[in-house]
Image (tube, helix red, strand yellow):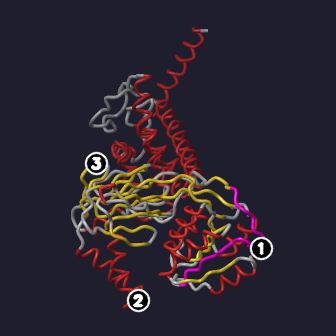
Amino acid sequence: MADQELTWWGTAARWDRALFDAVARRHWPGGDRVLPRLSRAANHGVLWGAAAAAIAAFGPPEARKAALRASASLALASATINTIGKWSVRRPRPLLDGVPAVRQLAVQPLTTSFPSGHSASAFAFTTGLALHAPLWGAALAPVAASVAFSRVYTGVHYPSDVAAGAALGVAAGFAVRRLAARIEEARAVPRDEPAAADAPALPDGEGLVVVVNAASGTPAAAGLDVLRAALPAAEVVECDGTELPEALADAASRAAVLGVWGGDGTLNAAAGAAMKAGVPLAVFPGGTMNHFALDLGLTGPEDTCRAVAEGRAVRVAVGRFTPGSEDGPAEPGYFLNTFSIGAYPELLRHRLHWSPRIGSGPAALLAAWKVLRAERPVRLRLAGRRRSVWLLFAGNGTYHGTGPAPRRREGLGEALLDVRLVHGGGRPGPRLLAAAFTGPLSRSPLHTATSLRTLRIAEIPPDTPFAYDGEYARSPSSLTLDTMPAALTVYRPDRRD
């Protein structure tokens, strides 16, 4: 058996050398000028990096994504070749007898011959590109084949080296595609989906008391008609913003289910009242911003009415901020969506000040101009370390998207804080814009993101503002942020409906 294997290897080696010699003897018009230069251009992946940059600069978004995955395929193939392939086989380079001097590279490679790294990189990049952008891959396929052939033509590899490298490159392209598909699949499925909760089914709304904040940004008349038609026995209490806390407390104390009609700030107050009274919450989105309702999957009052009638509910996590003991006794506050210190609370303060005078749109522009022009970073202590920050963002659960303050979250059952910082220094405008291009869980001089269960904030300067769910307040000297898992029962229709 061993003799047969030796014979097979010997025959393959002779054929390999014979093919190498045949290429050396053959003259291709123009090859002596083009192929050595093409081989040098592919050193260290420079040729493919330039191709990726050109596609990213001039191609459509789909092509840019394909170029990124092609570069990942090249990186995987190169790492495999240089860490496993070269040092496992240790095949010597071919002798250059018979290779014309005009073809030979000025600097000969020092690494072992098997497999060809240039061929692996060329086919990895082209395969990765072709799997996601076939036309771009087809355009570069002749270049990849020419690079692979140039390694035999210049005498630095046997044909089998090139074939093995090309095969490894193709395999790397398919491996990256499979990995990317798994990542996209994982992102498509919400993480930490909230658990189903026992909640009373109220087919006609008997036992439901809905508090309507008449000061919310969206008129409620049409939606209230839907509510009264679907749940005719429900009680509706209308109030303005100043009466809201008392109305919510009274409704929660006598209702089987507390309903609330308003935006995120109104929902925040209702969540506190529902948790204190120990009753489920029915959310009717009716404000200018309805982030919590959208993350629940509620698009209108019809969704909430159906969930209440059928008794479908989930238990969601709630963020909490607790003042330090040095500030005296104080009740904790809650956030369903986000908490922030720095640029956003200042922007909110200016907008609330100017909106009654000039309208919400112009007030938002004026607020942004004032914040970017005049504000200073906040100096405080985070988890025991002194920090200077333009913005501290804490989300109740992991949020989608890049940047310091993304808008949509992965799931409502996650008992984690999504903490993002834009570090102080320089001007806030360039810092905040640059931070918007960095990804989650990244580390950079501008932006830091991580997930925590608890965050201690101390040595907060006096009168520093903070914002929670679109509301504005002045911060005490210290705060502890954490999350309360499964703290609130809220109605939500079955997502399969």
Name the residue nearer the viewer: 182 or 482: 482
Answer with the quarter of the image where residue 481 lies.
Answer: bottom left
Q: Amino acid at mark 1?
A: Asp
Per the rendered image, the range of residues in magenta is 198-214
The reply to whether discs 2 and 1 touch (Cβ–Cβ < 8 Å) is: no
Work out which residue is located at the far bottom of the displayed protein and give it: 357
The residue where tag 2 is placed is: 359
Q: Residues within 10 Å of mark 3 (few under 14, many from 20)?
A: few
Q: Is residue 398 on the magenta stretch?
A: no
Horizontal and vertical percent position of residue 132: 55, 54
Q: Is residue 202 on the magenta stretch?
A: yes
Is 159 above or below relative to 287? Answer: above
| Helix, strand or loop at mark 1 | loop
Mark 3 vs 2, N-terminal side: 2
| Position of residue 200 in the picture relative to residue 1 (left or right) | right
Horizontal and vertical percent position of residue 262: 55, 77
The reply to whether discs 3 and 2 touch (Cβ–Cβ < 8 Å) is: no
Marks 3, 2: nearer the viewer = 3
Quadrant containing the N terminus is top right
The residue where tag 1 is placed is: 204
Name the residue nearer the viewer: 382 or 411: 382
Horizontal and vertical percent position of residue 247: 56, 77
| Position of residue 374 in the picture relative to residue 421 (left or right) | left
The residue where tag 3 is placed is: 384
Q: In the image, what residue occupies the spot 62% across and 66% down?
A: 281
| Helix, strand or loop at mark 2 | loop
Q: In the image, what residue occupies the spot 39% across and 32% down?
A: 82
Q: Amino acid at mark 2?
A: Gly
| Position of residue 294 in the picture relative to residue 82 (left or right) | right
Q: Main secondary structure of the magenta part?
A: loop
